[in-house]
Amino acid sequence: MQLSPQTGRAAPARLAITAFALTALLAAPAAMAATSSDEDKTLQAIVSANARLAPIAPVPTDELLRRSLLREVRLSPDGSQVAYLQQTRLQVYDVAQRTSRTLVADNAGGEVSWSADGKFVFIAAPTAVTSVEAATATAATLTALDPKREQRMVGIDSSRSAGVLVEDYDRAARKYKLSSYAPGAEARILYEGRQLRDFLLDTQGKPHFIKTLDDQYQQVISRQTAGGWKEVARCKPARACTLVHASADGSKLQLLTAYRDDLRSLVELDSATGARRLLHADPDAMTDLRRIAADPLSGEPLAAGYDLPHRRNVALTGAASAAMADIAARFPASSIVPTPSAAGKRWLLSETGSRMQQERYWVYDSATRQFEPILASEREQGKALPPERLAGKHPLRYRASDGATIHGYLTLPPGLDAARVPLMTLVHGGPWTRFDAEYHSLVQWLASRGVAVFQPNFRASTGYGDQYMLAPGMDLGNGRIQRDIIEGVQHLLHNGIGDKSRLAIAGDSFGGYSTLLALTHTPEMFRFGLATMPPPDFARIIELAQDENLAGNEDVPTSVRFREMGLDKNNHAAMAKLRAQSPAQGAAHVVRPLVMLAGGKDEKVEIGTVTAYASSLAAAGKPVTLLVEPGEGHSMRKPELRLAYIHFLERLLHEHLGGAEPAAPTAELARYLAQTVKIDNAFRATTNAMP
């Protein structure tokens, strides 16, 4: 279960298993019908355009799971070279010569970065930092990393040639240290104290501003002064608050943080008074600012990047304006993440999209305003599927019954009548995560088999500001979140999308819980539910989060995270309501087939609660199948488990949504199912699953 807000890099493309009266449920609420004319027109345009496309054939699962052979693609600070990993090789591409050469033929991999002077490429692995001289391909271990001391590379020291910054923990002194390492020189200790969660260096390479956590996990931002560290601001626990750039004299600090407790924006802080001034926010006033493209040497912010409803970039300086305008014009239908060289003279562009299985890379020259594709031949070795074999994903908005605007995505099988296709609702985990407009292999798997896919970003989803994320509070049962999901399905049906007699729902973690809620409180609506690692009672999850810190390896305990999200086990009325509405208390209402996959070592959902729920369903004669992988935690890492998921999904589609009859499982899969399936009552015939 993803129990914390999503932060950091975007996840790589993968097969993410990430899901009372029917007549009343399928009738669109009056509030929705009266206020959704614009959304209706948008949907009708999507449906019309999709109907004109050529149909696509089912894509084999293994083809949808192909990954790019390229990783860690990084532009040098001067924009003349691009370093990247291709399988086990560290390569460097010369932008002017349009040629690649190998720096290291065989390495264990790691994170790639450039030195500030562009002379060295660093590979930061868990046990060592390797420096490679780009001109001579000479490689050497810059420093070993001791996991027992929690050592890790955390950045580049721009004040030293080939300098890197390493954090470690001195257990005897109970202090964290930030040190600078460079070839042929002694390590410099730059900081000692609480663990640094973020920092900015001055022109001499010394920490200028730092962010630490206090004993209550508040984020404390401090400035270096003659008298030591002086606190200048605080940010709430478990909320993104990123140091971006500081003026040379330290009087002004730019932060990426929630502005007025809502949308994440670029904010300027007066370090003397603590006053905050908005510098930049979403021009559409809809979503959080996700990333800043900064000058690699000066640190000056050049462009702001947004991920929702699709990736878009906004210039923050006059010098970057032409580049952002050219990028938007050249790639109107793609997602672009731009990375600048110094002064934005060149930009490395990473191109992605819902119909793009693997990234494409370009270099944009600000002087000539030309785009140059790079690494095309290396990329082709990954055998990415062509876009014409994949379906487009469309952002959508709809009105909830309380008048709020809800966000999500719709994928339609190309060339098919939208009103006649099955409709699968996938519910994300968290609930404090989200879907985006990027490639999603499970979505493509379903679309290529003639199934439309709805991915709601209900309230509690991240990326639309704190108010949107915090809106549900403890209404996590058959309440606000679940209504947002159900009303999204109704909105699509109202607009002629999906066959109302062939609806299904699936999800993992919180999405699995939502699937159980759907089969409990809307028992006739969906033909089946498929849930992975689902908690049958979210009240129990809240108790565990506060008592046992479910995510014990996180910087901020789940007890603090849950409190920040408005969840409190001592809110007895809300807990009683949540427990009363839980699937665990409503097994008698389930009438549709339910397939659950669970991990025997799940650290966030007690396996006993899942098996007890499944047993209660089976004892009542309900159509339930339960697979328990004894060695798995709260994930779907094992290949056998993923194959079992697809096997179950194929059978469910065939039996309930008109899908093609699946092939019998291989001997290996049949043996695996025989070992892990504990209850098997969800299917019309079980002989196909067992040897």
Image (cartoon, rainbow, N blue to C red):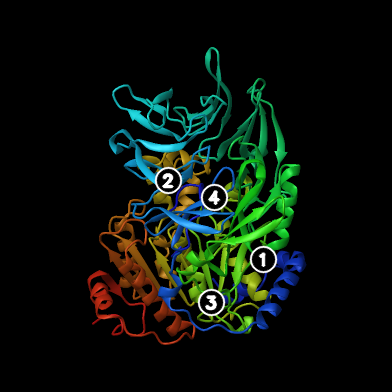
Q: Indicate the amino acid at tag 2.
A: Thr
Tag in front: 4 or 1: 4
Q: Quadrant of residue 50?
A: bottom right
Q: x, y percentage for residue 522?
A: 52, 70
- Judging depth in this view, the residue of 596 and 133 nearest the camera is 133
Residue highlighted by disc 4: 81
Residue highlighted by disc 2: 136
Question: How far apart are the two marked residues, 2 and 1, measured between alpha carbons?
Answer: 41 Å
Question: How far apart are the two marked residues, 2 and 4, measured between alpha carbons?
Answer: 14 Å
Question: How far apart are the two marked residues, 2 and 3, measured between alpha carbons?
Answer: 49 Å
The residue at 27%/71% (across/down) is 677
Q: Is residue 642 left or right of residue 309?
A: left
Whether residue 464 appears in this view of the structure is no
Considering only order in the chain, which callout, 3 or 1, is on the residue closer to the N terminus? 1
Residue highlighted by disc 3: 447
- Kind of element beneath mark 4: strand
Residue that lies at the very extreme toward the top in this rendered image: 227
- Judging depth in this view, the residue of 163 and 60 nearest the camera is 163
